[in-house]
Amino acid sequence: MSTRLSLRIQERINRLTKSEQKLARVILESPTLIETHSATELANIADVSKATAARFFRALGYADFEEVKLQAREERNRTQPYSYSVSPQGGTVLGRKISEHLELELTNLTRTFEEMDPDALRQASRMIADAPRVWFLGL
């Protein structure tokens, strides 16, 4: 499935500068980098300047990189987890083993904590520890 960012890049790639096209290729080849890296890190991977990265995202119609990152997270969160499951033959598997579900959950939890601000995580942990009562709700 193509993301909105990928579609924007493909629509405008011929109008981008050579440096912006280098960054575009990096993102098209590894779209998940948007969620796990900063704009500066993406610029370093593509071997372009931070200013080029800023111009690139503005040229695609975004206010800034944070808007891009937010959009990528929203798209990821709308995708059903089972769509990531692929059988050894390459087909999508809807009825997976519990171990595969647990592995996916662990991956998603790891990604969530990696993206969180460490100070916010510490503050949330303190609030939970100091709370007189904690309610856990599940779906």
Image: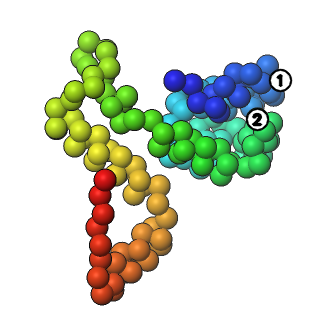
Can the viewer see residue 26 in this picture? no
Q: Earlier in the sequence, mark 1 or mark 2?
A: 1
Question: Regarding mark 2 in the picture, which secondary structure is present there?
Answer: loop
Q: Is residue 19 above or below residue 14?
A: below
Furthest toward the front, the residue is: 139
| Identity, as a three-letter code, of the amino acid under mark 2 | Leu
Q: For residue 98, which quarter of the picture?
A: top left
Q: Nearer the viewer, residue 6 or 93?
A: 93
Q: Nearer the viewer, mark 1 or mark 2?
A: 2
Q: Which residue is mark 2?
A: 60
User: Looking at the picture, does residue 10 appear above or below residue 39?
Assistant: above
Mark 2 surroundings within 10 Å by alpha-carbon count, few (fewer than 14), some (14 through 19), many (20 or more)? some
Q: Position of residue 64 (x, y in %)?
A: 73, 49
Q: Is residue 34 left or right of residue 20?
A: left
The tag on residue 15 is 1
Q: Give the class, few, some or many, for how many residues have Cα within 10 Å of label 1's Cα (few <14, many ≥20).
A: few
> Residue 135 has which mark?
none
Element type at marker 1? helix
Instruction: Please identify the quarter of the rendering in which residue 56 is found.
Output: top right
Inter-mark Cα distance, 1 to 2: 10 Å
Q: Is residue 2 visible?
A: yes
> As drawn, which residue projects farthest toward the top?
89
Q: Which residue is depicted at the point 22% across and 27% down?
A: 95
